[in-house]
Amino acid sequence: MDWTPAQLPSGRHGLPREYVMNSQRSRLLGAAVQIAGDEGYAGMTVSAVIGRAGVSRKTFYEFFQDREDLFLAAFDVVVEQALDGARAAYDEPGDWPERLRRVLAAGLDALAAHPHEARLGFVEVLAAGPRALARRDDALRVFMQFLAPGYEAAAAEQGGDDAEIPPLMPEAIVGAVYEIVYARVLQDRAAELPALLPQLQFCALAPFLGPVRAAELAAAGAAPARAKRRRARA
């Protein structure tokens, strides 16, 4: 999304108040994402944010109580955008393994393309306090919904028997994917994430469909992904 709308003209400009307020708030959110991505939550001070956004301290406090409140608002926007992209990928036609692969592909591509947002959502959220961690946990629970159909897929694959798959499997898979992504983002290696798609696809599918079928599907999806990366580099 466009975090940084153009600076408003100084003096009398005749722009609607709602437009002005939306522009100021967007610039504050964009500054928070950029500074948190570059300097961490510790560097995301009110002074740094208003300086980057080009707004007054008075304007800042018209929108946010403090820097934690600003961080939470920016995190919410990042998560909302991520979920919108994931749902759009999942809702396209296809069977469950294909839809799940698209969710993973869309997420990994987006994280690689937006390293500041990745840093805010995976690393700096850990430093922003218990309210931020609660928002993070809520977001992870939402992502589990994309794995819930795996039980039906397992029953179909195994002739109606999915009793051996623990109820917490979606939670375990989402937690594992989160930790893998976190490690790359922490090391400033978000650009490498799209290449992990076949492995993460296998990890997500294997508990439900078995390792052989999961490997087949991951291999089938790997060739188009490699071709896409070659076209992007060309």
Image: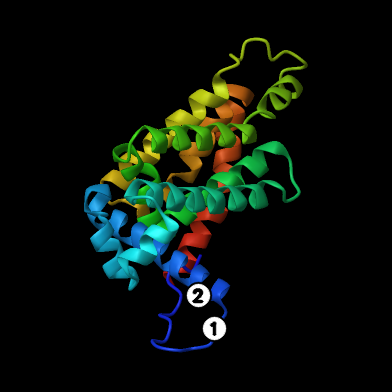
In the visual, does 139 lie left or right of 209?
Answer: left
Is disc 2 in contact with disc 1, using a CB cutoff of under 8 Å? yes
In the visual, does 38 lie left or right of 225?
Answer: left
In the visual, does 133 lie left or right of 16?
Answer: left
As drawn, 185 above or below 109: above
| Residue at 28% in and 57% down | 46
In terms of sequence position, does the residue under pointer 2 or pointer 1 come before the other? Answer: 1
Residue denoted by label 1: 15
Q: Amino acid at mark 2?
A: Val
As drawn, 59 above or below 215: below
Q: Splitting the image into 4 quarters, where does residue 7 fall?
A: bottom left
Q: Position of residue 183 (x, y in %)?
A: 31, 39
| Residue at 52% in and 33% down | 138
Quadrant housing the C terminus: bottom left
Q: Position of residue 209 (x, y in %)?
A: 63, 25
Residue denoted by label 2: 20
Q: Nearer the viewer, residue 62 or 115?
A: 62
Q: Nearer the viewer, residue 210 or 91?
A: 91
Distance in Å between CA atoms under marks 2 and 1: 7 Å
Q: Amino acid at mark 1?
A: Leu
| Residue at 55% in and 50% down | 80
